[in-house]
Image (cartoon, helix red, strand yellow):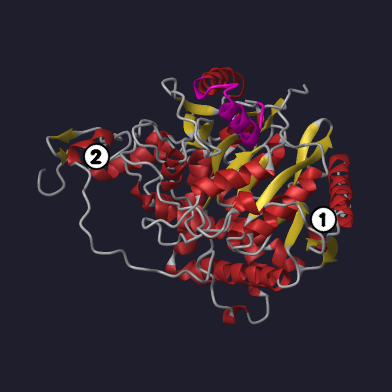
Amino acid sequence: MNKTIEELHELLKSGKVTSEELVKEALQKSHEINEKYNAFVTIMDDAKGGEVSDNYLSGIPYGIKDNYSTKGILSTGSSNTLKDYVPFFSATAVVNLEKNGAIPVNKTALDEFGMGGTGLTAHTGPVFNPWDKERMAGGSSAGSAVGVASGVYPYALGSDTGDSTRKPAAFCGIVGYKPTYGMISRYGLFPFASSLDHCSCFTRSVKDAAIVVDAMKGIDKYDQTSWDSSKMHLYDSIDGNVKGKKLFYIKEIANLENYPEASSELKMHLNNFHEKINLLKEEGVEIDEVSIDKNLLRAIPSVYICLSCAEATSNMSNLTGIIFGPRGEGKNYMEMMKDHRTKGFSPLIKRRFVIGSYILQKENQERYFINAQRVRRLIVDKMKELFKTYDGLILPVSTGAAPYINGSKDEITNDDTSILEEHLQIGNFGGFPSITIPCGFINNLPVGLNITGNCYDDINVLNLAYALESKMDYKNQIAKEVK
Amino acid sequence: MNKFTKELVNLYADKLLIGLTQEENDLILKEFDIIDSEMALINDIPNIKEVEPMTHALDDFSYTLREDIKEESIPIEELLQNCDRYEDREIEVPLVVGGE
C-alpha cells in the first residue's frame, strides 16, 4: 500500500499481488492507523478483493470521506445529527469509481459537514497528524488525508469548499486536487455551500490524482451543474513538457516583505517556496511576480465566510431529526427540532449558522451577502484576466507546517497572515482547477505549494504540477512520526 | 442594518432552532466584528454597487431539462429506516393541530 496506483496496477496485472491481499492489508492498516490518529468513522471489515482489469483502479482499495452518501453504509458527515444515518443511494462519484472496479475500505472523518479547517470537530473526536500527533491534520478532509499519507491506500475522496482538500494535503505531505467545478458530479455529496462545493481527491502523486479524477468525473443528470468532460483525458495528457508555459505568484501573498514580524518558520516556508519555483524555471517555465489590490485580497476570508455561512444555513435546514437523524426531546415538534439541533451541532457550526442567518436577513443582505457576491466577481474577474496571459497561479499553502492542536480555535481572524492562510478560497470562488503538492520540509514536517489555473484547463494545471513534482523528491512519500 | 447584538444573536439562533451558550454567543459577536470591519472596506471599493453579484462558480452553465421519463421510486419502508419513530408507513410526531 506504500506504492502509487500505477505501481499497484502493474503488480496486480502481473499477478505478483492479488486484490484480496491488498484489501486485507488496507483493512489491517485502517485499524492500526485509526488507533493512532482517529482518522476513520467506519472500517468496512467485510470488504473483499475484486476483479482486476486493464482499468488502473480495478482491485485497488480506497477511502471515502464520510460526507459522500454510500448506499447501505453509515454516512455521518461526522455529525451527531446523522450519527446513525445509512443512505439509500450512493453518490455519483462513488458509483463511477465502483464501475471502474475500485474497492472502498473505509469512511473517513471530517470537520462536521466539512465546515472547518482543523480536523478537530468530527463527532468521533479530533484527527491527528501522522507526522506529529500533537499537530492537526488540517480540515475538513482530515481522515482522508491521514489515510493516504499513512499508506492505508493510495487514494481517498475529499471535498473542497474553501481549501478542505488542498490544505490538509499540504499538512500531511501529499497531493490534493480539486478539478474544475462541475467536472465531478456533486450528487450524493452532503451539501455545505453549493456554489463553492467541489468533489476532490488525495493521492501521493500527480499522475495518480489524474487517474482518480478521470474515473470520478462525468456529466450527471442528477447534478445540473455537471458538464461533459468525456473528451478530456487527464492521465493520458500528462507529458511533463512545460517549456514556454507562464505562471505568476501574487507579491502581496508570497513575499516575505509583507510580514514584518514573520516567524522563523514562515521565513523558511516562503524561502523554500521561492527556491522550489526556480526548479520550474529550469524547465523553461516563465514565472512573474504580479501585484493585486491588497484590499481585494484582504476581503477573501470575509467574503468566503459570508457566502459559505449563508449557503450552509439554508442547506442544513433539513436537519430536524424528524424524518431522519436521532429524534430530539420536546412537547411539540418545534421543541424536538431545537433539541436535536442544539445537541447535534458542534459549537463551531452553530456559530457559522447564526452568522449566515444574520447576513441573509433582508435588512443586512446588501451589505454582507450581495456585496460578498460582488467582491467574488471582482476577484474571479481579476484571476480570469491574468489567466489570459498566464497558465496558472502558483503560491505557498498556509503559513508553514501543520499547526499544533493545543491552542487551535478555528476562529475568524484578520491578522497579517490571514490572506496567506486563506487564499486557496480563490479556487472555489471561480471554480478553478487547483492542486497542492508537497514541496519540502520545515523542522521535519511537510509543507506544500499550490497551482491553480483557469476553468477547464485542468490538463495544464496537472502538467505543471507533474513537471515540478518530477524535479523534487516528495512523490509518494509516506508519513513517519518525527516526534 | 441593525447592529449585531447579544439579543439579536439569540434571536437568530432561535429562528434557526439552535440553542447557544453564553460563550458561543460572545464568540459570534467577536467573529462578526472582524467580518464587519472587512466588509466595511468592501463598501469603500469605488462603484461596487455596479458590479453584478456572482452567485455561482461558473458563469457558463448550460442547463438541459431531463427527459420526462418515469423512474422507479424508493420504497417508503426503505426510507423510513433512518427515522426514529414511525408507524406503518407514516412518521410519528406529537399532535400539531387541536389537542390541549
Task: Using a 10 Å C-alpha cutoff, classify the residue at mark 2 as few (fewer than 14 neighbours), some (14 to 19) or many (20 or more).
Answer: some
Specify whether residue B32 is painted magenta. no
Please give left or right for residue A281 compared with residue B55 in the image: right
Q: In the image, is residue A319 above or below residue A119?
A: below
Q: In the image, is residue A342 above or below residue A194?
A: above
Specify whether residue A15 is painted magenta. yes
The residue that disc 2 covers is: B79
The residue that disc 1 covers is: A254
Q: Which mark is residue A348?
A: none
Along the viewing direction, whichever of A253 and A241 lies nearer the viewer: A241
Under mark 1, the amino acid is Ala
Under mark 2, the amino acid is Leu
Magenta stretch, main secondary structure, is: helix
Chain of the residue under the numbered disc 2 shown in the image: B
Task: Using a 10 Å C-alpha cutoff, classify the residue at mark 1 as few (fewer than 14 neighbours), some (14 to 19) or many (20 or more).
Answer: many
Along the viewing direction, whichever of A65 and A12 lies nearer the viewer: A12
Q: Describe the element under mark 1 as helix, strand or loop.
A: helix
Q: Quadrant of residue A145?
A: top right
Along the viewing direction, whichever of A230 and B99 lies nearer the viewer: A230
Please give left or right for residue A131 compared with residue B95 in the image: right
The quarter of the rendered structure image containing the N terminus of chain A is: top right
Q: Quadrant of residue A483?
A: top right
Q: Which residues are magenta?
A: A2-20
In the image, what residue occupies the spot 41% across and 42% down?
A95
For the view shown, which residue lies furthest in the front direction? Answer: A14
What is the x, y in percent for residue A55? 52, 39
What is the x, y in percent for residue A248? 79, 63
Residue B93 in view: no
Residue A80 in view: yes
- Is the same chain shared between marks 2 and 1? no
